[in-house]
Image: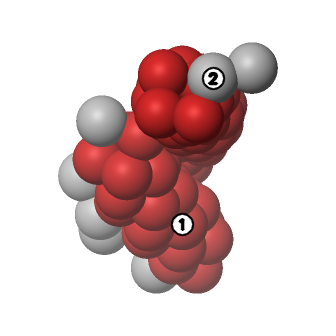
Amino acid sequence: MGRNLLILSATLLLFSLVSCGMQWSAGTHGGTLPGDVVLWQTISLGLLVASLVAAVAGMLASMFGQVKRREAERAERERRYGR
């Protein structure tokens, strides 16, 4: 699950960068793009925040998964060799 969240985070970051580029190009083309600059700034910021939240969730899921695997390995080692 952690890997999927990290992929989602990267995708959201890419869309955030595209929105940031739309913001800059909306200002240079004289408003020929849909919406205005403030709309693209808001979308870009929202996607960036969502990307950061997904990245933190992905890292936490990976860390807890690693702890769970190590605990299972330790229990298996104790079961086999005793303590």
Q: Are marks 1 and 2 in contact (CB under 8 Å)?
A: no
Residue 1 in sight: yes
Residue at x-position 75% and y-position 20%: 83
Between disc 1 and disc 2, the foreground one is 2
Q: Nearer the viewer, residue 3 or 18?
A: 3
Residue located beneath label 2 in the image: 82
Residue located beneath label 1 in the image: 17
Image vertical order of residue 53 relative to residue 5, above or below: above
Residue 48 picture quarter = top right
Image vertical order of residue 14 relative to residue 69, above or below: below
Residue at x-position 63% and y-position 23%: 82
Numbered-mark total:
2
Amino acid on which disc 2 is placed: Gly
Amino acid on which disc 1 is placed: Leu
Q: Position of residue 74 (x, y in %)?
A: 62, 30
Q: Position of residue 5 (x, y in %)?
A: 38, 40
Q: Position of residue 15 (x, y in %)?
A: 38, 59
Measure the C-alpha gap from mark 1 to mark 2: 54 Å
Q: Quadrant of the N terminus?
A: top left
